Image (cartoon, helix red, strand yellow):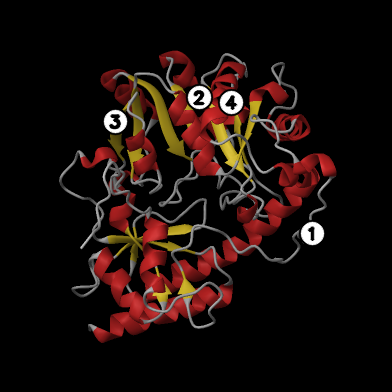
Amino acid sequence: METIIPGFRSVPRTGVIYVTHEATRHGFVYGHPEWANLGQGSPETGPIPNSPPRVEAVSIAPAAQQYGTVSGAKDLRQAVADFYNATYRRGKKSQYTADNVSIAGGGRLALTRLASALGNINMGHFIPDYTAYEELLSVFKAFTPIPILLRAESGYKIAPADLKEEILGRGLSALLASNPANPTGQLMEGKELAAWCDLARECQCSMIFDEFYSHYIYTGAKAQAKMVSAAEFVKDVDKDPVVIVDGLTKNWRYPGWRISWTLGPKAVIEAIASAGSFLDGGANHPFQNAALPLLDPKNAAAETLAIQKHFGRKRELVLARLKKIKIGVDAAPAGAFYVWANLAKLPAPLDDGMNFFRECLKEKTIVVPGVFFDVNPGNRRATARYKNYCRISFGPEIDKLELGLNAFERVIAKFK
């Protein structure tokens, strides 16, 4: 029976935290050789073929022992601005500066700062999407979260014309989207992404792009690194209502550093810095200094190319094995490192994501049931979607992927 303490509410765990907690009750610990964590939301962090050397030591200057500034070290903020200008904005008149960047202690915190700075508005979000959005969109009461359903029949994407109808019809003043998307891996790029930025200007709707997987791209030529960002289609960095959140977590494969940034108009950056002053006080100071060389465009391009080749091979491995064992994929991922797996054709009870998850635990493998991605702030909708789905991560090392895929086969064999 749950213990209730006066004044406190029950706070749910996000999908990854929930499944990891359940797995520990079955004997899971990080690094256990018999377990495959295909539910993890982080990439492998060690060396991969042709990647730049990994940072293995951080030197802490005496000044970095003190608190850092709430908005982040100016050198790092300028390095982030320079990276985006060099990568996406060559030849454009409007350029990002340090004043367009705020540093935070990880992606969730960056998004929390943004959410706390929003006014009394309608805030659009998509389903399915990142599980942590649910509580993030619930806890701040100034804005009203409005769900927009992405359908399997349309490849979990929405056409710009349809998006415009949603913005105008629902009176949206802001919209939150992950690109590439978590959990479906769908990608907006080129003319499509440009059209979204056009809508931000035309409809005066702030587009908040979660771009944490924007270096995990599997479209186009494989001989050179390909990165995707809405920053490419911003006309005026201080007037366009386009805000970008990214960091070292996924695209540089340093999740434990907890260093993220928000890129946007100066007015937005000033607002979230004010929010940070009472929410968290600022990001880890020593790691901000260590992050500077990672943002060199040549270093980032080398890491990105290594990611795309290595994770591209893992993507093909997982898709091929899932096809073999009759686990469906409505739309193959064009980005990120997840497969949104359709379990509907598996024998009962495995056609239910939560049942599949629990049976996989018995075989020392973790996945995330699809119901966690039905972002439902405040539980205002009674019917849960995506019961027949689960998210499978190809973030782990290849040997762990094979361990988990073999476990899927054993689970399915039990119910044939």
**Which of label 4 and label 2 is nearer to you?**
4
Mark pair 4, 1: CA separation: 29 Å
Q: Residue 146 carries which label?
A: 3
Mark pair 4, 2: CA separation: 24 Å
**Which of label 3 and label 4 is nearer to you?**
4
Q: What residue type is labelled 2?
A: Cys
Residue 264, compared with residue 112, is above or below; it is: above
Q: Residue 353 at what x, y percent from top left? A: 27, 64
| Mark 2 vs 1, N-terminal side | 1
| Mark 4 vs 2, N-terminal side | 2
The residue pinned by badge 2 equals: 197
* Mark 4 secondary-structure assignment: helix
The residue pinned by badge 4 equals: 273
| Mark 1 vs 3, N-terminal side | 1
Q: Can residue 25 be seen in this view?
A: yes
* Mark 1 secondary-structure assignment: loop
Q: Residue 157 at what x, y percent from top left? A: 38, 41
| Mark 4 vs 1, N-terminal side | 1
Q: What residue type is labelled 4?
A: Ala
Q: What residue type is labelled 3?
A: Ile
Q: Which mark is residue 57?
A: 1
- Look at 72% across and 66% down and name the residue there: 49
**Residue in front for this viewpoint, 188 or 386:** 386
Relative to 116, is 382 on the left or the right?
left
Mark pair 2, 1: CA separation: 40 Å
Callout 3 touching callout 4 (CB < 8 Å): no
